[in-house]
Amino acid sequence: VIVSDLSSAQLRAALAGPGLRVRTGPVVTRISSRLAEVVNGVHLHYAQHPVVDAASFTDFHVSIRRPYGPRRWFKRQVLFDFDGDTPFTPLPGDQGMPMLEWGMNWCVSNHFHQYVTIHAGAVERGGRAIIVPAPPGTGKSTLCAGLSFSGWRLLSDELTLIDPATGLIHGLARPIGLKNASIEVLRRFSPDVRIGPTVHETTKGSVAHVAPPPASVAQVDRPARPAWIVLPRYLAGSQATLEPMPQAEAFMQLVDNSFNYHLHGARGFAVLAALVDGCDCYRFTYGDLSEAAARFALLAASPGS
Amino acid sequence: VIPRRPGASDGDRPEYWRGSSEREVSVHQWGDDTVVYVRRSAETHWLDSEAASAYLLLRATPRPVTLAELATHLGRAESEGHTDLSELLEELSELGLAIPDGPAP
């Protein structure tokens, strides 16, 4: 069963009642909420994801709800619950869906330590994956979104999970978070994208989430071999330029952008070093998403190692 | 600033050094670039080529290495002296990569 198999009433009842257990790659999350924007958001963004029965192991139990007290009604707020705890301060009342997405990212980055987790996007094509590590504001999610709608398979726009035993990337195929001007850029880039409502005045500015391509969700259980590490930089008006980057620098970028490298100790060092051994590493500057997609199509067509 | 005792001195700079072992430090190289993971501090460092070369010599040599041997290994002329080498080794020591093994004889 996938989420879109449920009727609106069934989805609403599951979210308001026992919770909806959704599988995103190796992660099972039980989501609960009575808020209409969250119900609509799950319906849009998780339509193709498998629903897991209550007997299955669930990694995270989360909910988005109104706080108790006056803020339930006046200047409404939303809260993120995780295993019965509320790790974040409340957000304004219309930010339920972004808060769910940010909270689910937080669950994985803080608790899913069987993988080495990098703050990076990842997409795959022809059996080879690009890892795009970068701090916020560098165009990482926009680039991943553009590639995901031009022939690449989305693994994640935010969390790259490396299996320490195999060195392969396990995808999540979750919604892609876009900010500010990137929302319109992607809308113009591909008519196929399904973008949720734009939520304004968040801590990140205006944000909207893009539903992952159905084909990426359908293939989410197929791990991918890392072949390239690309450090992006969006620079308005610039030409798409791919420049080689020393492997040691790429390694340090992975270390700096890892959520849990420090927990893996010497094993984490060995895993990331082996990963970089198998990759070509580049810096990528771009100012136009179509041009960027064309440049990466050439990369995908290059002979594999 | 801690006031120094009258007559106190730092003593002689160490002349003999040895490298932290494979058990203490993981190393990976790409060409001239070397990265290391130091278990005690759980820190990762990208070494420049000279620091890497010095550390790898210390680690590969089963006995303490003198500054003079290190200078030869790094292609330094005798006339250059060993002051900056001492400083390099002290930096490696702070990173947990090198251990002083005795003063100048």
Image (cartoon, coloured by chain):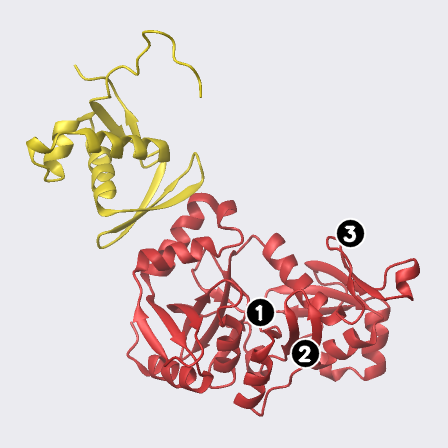
Chain colours: A red, B yellow
Let me know if residue A254 appears in the view.
yes
Q: Earlier in the sequence, mark 2 or mark 1?
A: 2
SS type, badge 2: helix
- Contact between labelled residues 1 and 2, with CB atoms less than 8 Å apart: no
Residue at 71% from the left image edge and 66% from the top image edge? A100
Q: Earlier in the sequence, mark 3 or mark 2?
A: 2
Let me know if residue A52 appears in the view.
no
Whether marks 1 and 3 lie on the same chain: yes
Q: Nearest the camera: B12 or A113?
A: B12
Determine which quarter of the picture holds residue B8. top left
| Residue A64 location (% of width, % of height) | 79, 65
> Which disc, if any, is residue A54?
none
Badge nearest the viewer, 1 or 3: 3
**Mark 1 — residue?**
A172
| Residue A51 location (% of width, % of height) | 71, 73
Q: List the single residue furthest toward the top.
A: B6
Three-letter residue code for mark 1: Leu
The C terminus of chain B appears in which quarter of the rendering? top left
Whether marks 3 and 2 lie on the same chain: yes
How far apart in space, not on screen, are marks 2 and 1 (Cα)? Answer: 13 Å
| Residue A67 location (% of width, % of height) | 86, 60
**Mark 3 — residue?**
A85
